[in-house]
Image (cartoon, helix red, strand yellow):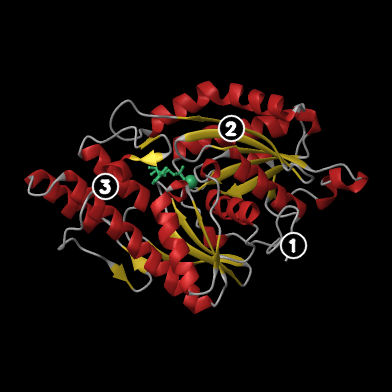
């Protein structure tokens, strides 16, 4: 651990400025966040899009290595600062794909070393929660985190974001993308901000007989995916009906689990975060559920639903100001299966510019 005395920038009333690096999955991104308004100074990203099939970790890593330099440069240019002006460097060290994570960790280590900056280790899932709290101002929410790799219901309790429910197999985003890929609807999976499954669902009707699986507080999607693919391959139902049903069951089951968590913890706020938070229909369903319970729901802008560097910079800044998870660069090891509930959140319920 670096001594807290090295967190010097705020002592002379200068804003604390943190550069955050994201490289856990398909996006290499750099964000820069300041402790003073306008808070978000830069948001630069490049997404790896496979020409066909799924994501190959080695190809992603090679793409990240090619774009890393220009993304860092672009972010500094947007912020109108040089690396020397930074208070700290933050990096998402997990969870995620090893080869992809290693590129972000290497870039972060190099920057921290070369510019003599403290390095802050950030958990990617915590960052999705923090960006949602910051953007909505809902500071003590039940969080539904749905992305390409995760489907988790979280809420803060006793120092950490605790997992109240999660998928037992594949994530919601993975289910939508896999169905789209197997039926030729994608890639790309998202066109004009809309998932191809949404587009295909228009005018569709509900088919009975697909599995709706909620076990306790957990959901399961692999049986639903198999049933939908079987129905499509047999050609007994129009594709729009299969898409509509897949989406209805996928969304409803995860909203059910979020609802149970809300009732259990007795909180009054709900937020949705992660790539699938860009989905209009899921937002609508969650908002209706929150209203039924007299809870507040606020949507996050689509732009910050998916992976981005701003959320890493924001979380890095909160962590840095709490002297938490500041590490020596040579100890910046990636953690592919770093669980969200292993991370302390000493700044809670504060966020940038707001406290309860
Ligand atoms: P992330 O890993 O957080 O960047 O999220 C990526 C996932 O979000 C992928 O599975 C995408 O298909 C999914 N996604 C992005 N936009 C949408 C949308 N509008 N509706 C549903 N899923 C989406
Ligand atoms: Mg993500």
Q: Position of residue 137 (x, y in %)?
A: 65, 58
Rate crowding at label 1 as few (under 14), some (14 to 19) or many (20 or more) other CA atoms within 10 Å: few
Q: Which residue is mark 2?
A: 106
- Secondary structure, mark 2, is helix
Residue at the front extreme? 203
Which mark, by number, is residue 201? Answer: 3
Q: Nearer the viewer, mark 2 or mark 1?
A: 1
Q: Is residue 188 above or below residue 238?
A: above
The answer to whether residue 26 is left or right of residue 177 is right
Distance between mark 3 and mark 1 Cα atoms: 41 Å
Q: Earlier in the sequence, mark 3 or mark 1?
A: 3
Q: Which residue is rendered at x = 53% and y = 74% of the image?
A: 294
Rate crowding at label 3 as few (under 14), some (14 to 19) or many (20 or more) other CA atoms within 10 Å: many
Which mark, by number, is residue 4? Answer: none
- Secondary structure, mark 3, is helix
Q: Is residue 266 above or below residue 343?
A: below
Q: Is mark 1 within 8 Å of ligand 2?
A: no
Q: Are marks 3 and 1 in contact (CB under 8 Å)?
A: no
The answer to whether residue 268 is left or right of residue 348 is left
């Amino acid at each position: 651990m670096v001594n807290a005395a090295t967190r010097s920038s705020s002592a002379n009333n200068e804003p604390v400025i943190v550069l955050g690096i994201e490289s856990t999955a398909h996006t290499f991104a750099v964000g820069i966040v300041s402790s003073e308004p306008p808070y978000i100074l830069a948001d630069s990203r490049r997404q790896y899009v496979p020409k066909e099939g799924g994501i190959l970790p080695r190809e992603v890593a090679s793409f990240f290595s090619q774009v890393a330099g220009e993304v860092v440069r672009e972010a500094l240019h947007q912020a109108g600062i040089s690396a020397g002006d930074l208070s700290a460097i933050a990096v998402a060290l997990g969870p995620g794909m090893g080869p992809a994570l290693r590129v972000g960790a290497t870039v972060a280590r190099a920057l921290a070393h070369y510019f003599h900056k403290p390095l802050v280790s950030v958990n990617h899932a915590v960052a999705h929660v923090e960006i949602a709290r910051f953007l909505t101002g809902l500071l003590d929410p039940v969080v539904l985190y749905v992305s390409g790799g995760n489907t988790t219901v979280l809420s803060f309790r006793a120092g950490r974001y605790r997992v109240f429910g999660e998928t037992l197999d594949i994530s919601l985003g993975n289910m939508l993308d896999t169905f789209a890929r197997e039926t030729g609807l994608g890639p790309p999976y998202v066109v004009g901000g809309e998932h191809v499954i949404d587009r295909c669902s228009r005018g569709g009707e509900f088919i009975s007989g697909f599995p709706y699986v909620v076990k306790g507080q957990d959901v399961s999607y692999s049986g639903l995916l198999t049933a939908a693919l079987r129905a499509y391959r047999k050609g007994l139902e129009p594709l729009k009906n299969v898409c509509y049903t897949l989406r209805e069951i996928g969304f409803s089951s995860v909203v059910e689990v979020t609802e149970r968590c809300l009732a259990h913890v007795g909180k009054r706020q709900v937020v949705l975060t992660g790539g699938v938070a860009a989905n209009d229909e899921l937002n609508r369903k969650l908002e209706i559920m929150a209203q039924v319970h007299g809870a507040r729901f606020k949507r996050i802008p689509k732009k910050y639903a998916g992976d981005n560097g701003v959320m890493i910079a924001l979380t890095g800044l909160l962590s840095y100001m709490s002297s938490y998870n500041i590490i020596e660069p040579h100890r910046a090891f990636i953690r592919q299966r770093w669980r969200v509930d292993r991370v302390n959140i000493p700044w809670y319920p504060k966020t940038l510019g707001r406290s309860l």
